[in-house]
Image (tube, rainbow, N blue to C red):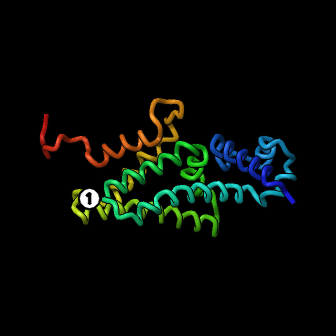
Amino acid sequence: MPRQGRKDDVLAAAIALFSRKGYHGTTVRDIADEAGMLSGSLYAHYSSKEEMLFDIVQQAAGQFISGIGPMLESDQPAADKLRAAMRSHLRVMALSRDAAAIYLHEWKALTGDRRTIIAEKRNAYEEGLAAIIRQGVEAGEFRPVDAKFARLLVLSALNWLYQWYDPAGALGPDAVADKFADLVLHGLTNGEEGASS
């Protein structure tokens, strides 16, 4: 029976290579070399390169979804929910940067049922963010906005983190999320709508 530790080594090698070279730019032999094993031995753990990609993306999707779930069930104000959701998202991005980048960019290489499963999970997660925004609008906490565009704005800011975030930098993921949340929730104006300099 294959050892779990070796399967973890294979997955870690696939994450490192997919994030660096892309899914299509990585071969099974590349992954085996990175994991320090023969190509044939790799198939004791995964039946295909696509199965590895699915495992990586599935785990990342699970992290994002499990983070937002409690917010959706909470009776907190929408602004608090959105801030907490942004913190949760950035923790995943900061602590699993390579896997998160693969989730964001390589998932479309999946085919058939695997692609459908991940697309549904991504849609459910994004709908969760939109639901928080709609709740804020309906409660009068947020001004009337298009929830789809607000969700896209939030995700665009959050998902770019893997490009520039330095774990050794001065700000942790929660502090970055709070700065983003303050900008999203309060904007750039000084409260005087339409005021010009």
Q: Vertical placement of 76 versus 94: above or below?
A: below
Q: Amino acid at mark 1?
A: Val
Picture coordinates of residue 169, whole percent (x, y): 49, 30
Picture coordinates of residue 149, whole percent (x, y): 34, 56
Quadrant including the C terminus: top left
Answer few, some or many: residues within 10 Å of disc 1's Cα (few below 14, many 20 plus, some between 14 and 19): few
User: Quadrant of the rendered structure where residue 74 is?
Assistant: bottom left
Q: Is residue 2 left or right of residue 57?
A: right
**Toward the viewer: 41 or 85?**
85
User: Quadrant of the rendered structure where residue 132 is?
Assistant: bottom left
User: Quadrant of the rendered structure where residue 30 is?
Assistant: top right
Q: Is residue 57 left or right of residue 160?
A: right
Q: Secondary structure at mark 1?
A: loop
Identify the residue under disc 1. Answer: 145
Q: Is residue 35 left or right of residue 169?
A: right
Q: Vertical placement of 131 versus 97: above or below?
A: below
Residue drawn at the location 46% of the way across and 59% of the way down? 68
Residue drawn at the location 29% of the way across and 49% of the way down? 185
Picture coordinates of residue 60, whole percent (x, y): 58, 54
Q: Vertical placement of 23 versus 136: above or below?
A: above
